[in-house]
Amino acid sequence: LSTYSSGSTPQIIYAEGNINISGDYPDSLIVVAGGNIYIDGDIGPDVGPSGIRPQVGLLAERDVIIPATTAANGGDLTLEAFIMANGGGGAQGNFIAEGPKFSKGTLDFTGAIAARGVGRSAIDLNAFTQRNYVFNSDLSANNSIPFSPFIANIVLWDEVNPSDPFPPS
C-alpha cells in the first residue's frame, strides 16, 4: 500500500480474485476483493503533514485471512482498517488468523470488523497470544469510508457456540 497514492480520496481498488495486502496507506481507500483478502503484514495510515488520518476499508466477497506465515514465530501485527468478510461463493465469511493457537505475539487492531461467520466463529484470531481491539470512531465521524455510517458500533461482544441459547443471557 505504501506505493499507492491517488492524490484524492477516497479511491477504490478492485480485483476479481484474491488480494494480498500490507503496508501504509497515504490516502483513504477501499480495497474490494472478489475472493479472499490475505493480510501479509502491518496495515496502517501514513499521516502526512496535513495531520489528516486516512482510513482504509478491506472488503472481501469471501474471507479475510491472516496467513500462518504473517507474524509467525511469536511476531506482532498491527492493523488499522474496516474489515468485512461477506462469505459469498461458498466461503464462511470469517476473519481468521491461521496457525496454532497462541503461536503469534500481539495483535493490535484499530477499526471495525463485520463478518458473517457461517459454521464457526466469525472472528477467530486466537493464533495471537494477546489481542487488543479499539473501535475507530473516525470511520463514521468524517465519512472517510463510504457507507461507514451504517456500520454498527459494537462496544461489547462475547463469543458463543452455535448450540448456546439465543439470545445470550
Image: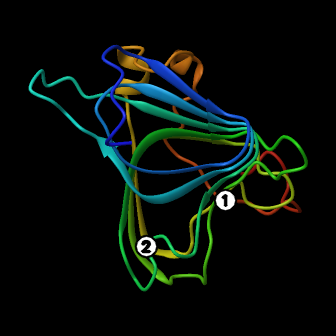
In the rendered picture of this protein, how many numbered marks are placed on residues?
Answer: 2
Do we see residue 32 in this rendering? yes
From the viewer's perspective, tell me whether residue 38 is left or right of residue 17.
left
Q: Which of pointers 1 and 2 lies earlier in the amino acid sequence? A: 2
Residue 152 image offset from top left, x and y in percent: 58, 28
Q: Which residue extends farthest front?
A: 3
Q: Residue at x 59, y 18 (%)?
A: 150
Query: Distance from label 1 to label 2 (Cα)?
Result: 24 Å
Indicate whether 111 appears above or below 48. Answer: below
Task: Please say if 112 is above or below 27.
Answer: below
Q: Give the percent coordinates (x, y) of residue 137.
A: 37, 28
Quadrant assignment, res 66 = bottom right
Residue placed at 73% from the left, 43% from the top?
A: 17
Q: Residue at 46% across / 19% down in the picture? A: 11
Query: Does the CB distance between marks 1 and 2 fall below 8 Å?
Result: no
For badge 1, the amino acid type reads Glu
Residue bearing the label numbered 2: 71
User: Pointer 1: residues within 10 angstroms few (<14), some, or many (20+)?
Assistant: few
Q: Foreground residue, 20 or 151?
A: 20
Above-or-below relation of 153 to 24: above
**Amino acid type at mark 2:** Ala
Residue 62's quadrant in the figure? top right
> Could one spot residue 110 in this view of the protein?
no
Q: Which mark is residue 159?
A: 1
Looking at the rendered structure, the secondary structure element under dot 1 is: loop
| Residue drawn where x is 15% and y is 30% of the image | 48
Single out the mark in the foreground, 1 or 2: 2
Residues 164 and 1: in front is 1
| Outermost residue toward the left in this view | 49
